[in-house]
Amino acid sequence: MDWQELDRELEQGHIAPVYLFYGSEGYLQERALKYLKERLIPPEAESFDYQELDGRELAGTAIAMLAVTLPALAERRLVVIKNPADETWKDTSLLAYLAGPEPSTCLVFVVAGSIDKRLKAMKEIANAGREVEFSPLREEELATWLAREARQEGYTLPPAAARLLARAGGDLRQARNELAKAMTCTGSPGIITPAVVQALVPEVEAENTIFQLVDGLGNRQAARAIGLLRRLLARGEAPLGIVAMLARQLRLIYQVHLAGGNKNLAAQLGVKPFVARKAAAQARNFSLAAAGQALEELLKVDTGLKTGQGEPGPLLEQAIWTITARGEH
């Protein structure tokens, strides 16, 4: 199911005993977790009946033991396990728990990226609970979402203003922040005009857009990446510079696979920690082989541009489609 279906279920009061939240839209994951916490855990019970843990540091047996612990003050416990290690999904104790989860616990696994649906654990979760994908919103979906967010605050965000915010907002978290600025500027609840949005959210500078393009490719968002590519080329951005930036990110993704879960990933890659974290998250969207093939695609573009074998736009767009289609295969 997707996050919108989850929203409808939670609004109706249906809360499953186990969830798998996966995908690259972390803001929506956080909102869903916040809603579950508000529904299940009263403030006085938080210290006893709510746990949020790093799954990379927990074995499947430990997760199963946490999940069978009975609530102390709340009616149900909420246990959140973020980014479990690959071997955790194969743990027999965890598989046994997933086959018959404790009804007084809501166990939520959160994965920042894709997941191998062929694993037995995924089948058990699908049978006992819900698998929920949190994918980035396309531009038109983001505009609709922003309009709904504005309505909930008492504001009206017309389609033209919503589209401007969606184009300038970047990811969902940033877009929501820009909406908050527009609401503050408008003052009391009313109509947020396109003029207000244009004044507050100037067109994204090329430097920001190139990083958004890199993220679009790393997150396998072909349509978004191509849209950003066209904007960059229309501004006169050097095609070979774009190729270099995309290749740099794909090399980092490739190196993440070679690192094999090294805890000092940033040092090994020679980048800042936040860059390493982003590369590690995006590496979930590409296998080692797919990352290598993606680099080969960009090498073809580089050669084509230098030898005059085609126009920059079509060459780069075809490469993006090919790379994002391969993804984790």
Image (cartoon, rainbow, N blue to C red):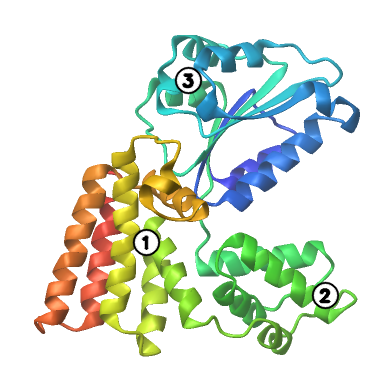
Task: Give coordinates of residue 194: x percent, y percent.
Answer: 68, 86
- CA separation in Å, label 1 and label 3: 32 Å
Lower position in the chain sequence, tag 3 or tag 2: 3
Labels 3, 2: front one: 2
Q: Nearer the viewer, residue 74 or 259?
A: 259
Q: Residue at x 81, y 21 (%)?
A: 48
- CA separation in Å, label 1 and label 2: 33 Å
Lower position in the chain sequence, tag 1 or tag 2: 2
Q: Is residue 56 left or right of residue 179?
A: left
Q: Residue at x 71, y 71 (%)?
A: 179
Tell me the kind of residue under disc 3.
Glu
Q: Residue at x 24, y 48 (%)?
A: 290
Labels 1, 3: front one: 1
Task: Give coordinates of residue 312: x percent, y percent.
Answer: 23, 81
Query: What number is the disc on residue 184?
Result: 2
Lower position in the chain sequence, tag 1 or tag 3: 3
Query: What number is the disc on residue 217?
Result: 1
Q: Element under label 2?
A: helix
For disc 2, the neighbor class at 10 Å (few under 14, some 14 to 19, many from 20) is few
Tell me the kind of residue under disc 2.
Thr
Q: Element under label 1?
A: helix
Disc 1 to disc 3: CB gap under 8 Å? no
Could you tell me if residue 172 is visible in this image? yes
Query: What number is the disc on residue 124?
Result: 3
